[in-house]
Image (spheres, rainbow, N blue to C red):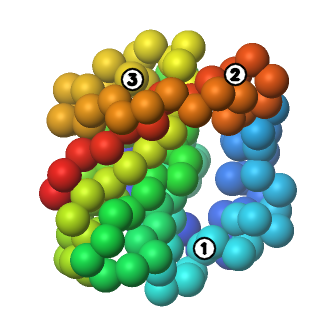
Amino acid sequence: MISYREATLLDIPVLVSLDREYFPHTAWPAEQFRGEIGRPTRCFLIAESGTEVIAYAGAFLPNAGGEGDIMTIAVKPEHRRIGIAKELISRLESWAKARGAIAMMLEVDVSNESAISLYKNLGYETLNIRKNYYGYGRDAQIMRRGL
């Protein structure tokens, strides 16, 4: 059974480890997670199977009535395509909407076709391509969904 909860500072070591595995070129250091988790303008969620962290996602909303931003989302490969990312996104959107957000934005590597397909299925539309966002030659697709 999969459960969802807010991340705590105690989750940082596993989040850093997973982030390095999934995003080796842009992994967040522990200090970045520490600066995000628990802040009132941030929502960081964990998905667990038993006691194992199998996915995480984080978003921020700088201003009520503005646009939220999904900063990161990752699901362990063996747990993909069963609705975990969709559930995490739904929970992030609900959190942002409850705080007055009018839309959510995100960036996704243009080569990540499965993530782009998921976001499109959830109603996200492509706004632009940001060149070299993930490093030289690694572009990001900027996507947005109105809430």
The residue that appears at 55% across and 48% down in the rendered structure is: 72
Q: Is residue 64 above or below residue 24?
A: below
Quadrant location of the N terminus in the rendered image = top left
Answer yes or no: is residue 56 visible.
no
Secondary element under disc 2, as helix, strand or loop, is loop
* Contact flag, marks 3 and 1 (Cβ < 8 Å): no
- Looking at the image, tell me whether mark 1 or mark 2 is earlier in sequence order: 1
Mark 1–mark 2 Cα distance, whole angstroms, equals 27 Å
Closest to the observer: 24 or 106? Answer: 106
The 10 Å Cα crowd at callout 1, few under 14, some 14 to 19, many 20 or more, is: many
Q: Mark number for residue 138?
A: 2
Sequence-first tag of 2 and 3: 3
> Spatial distance from mark 2 to mark 3, Cα to Cα?
15 Å
The residue labelled by disc 3 is 116
Residue 145 location, x and y as percent? 24, 46
Q: Residue 43: horizontal and vertical position, in percent?
A: 45, 69
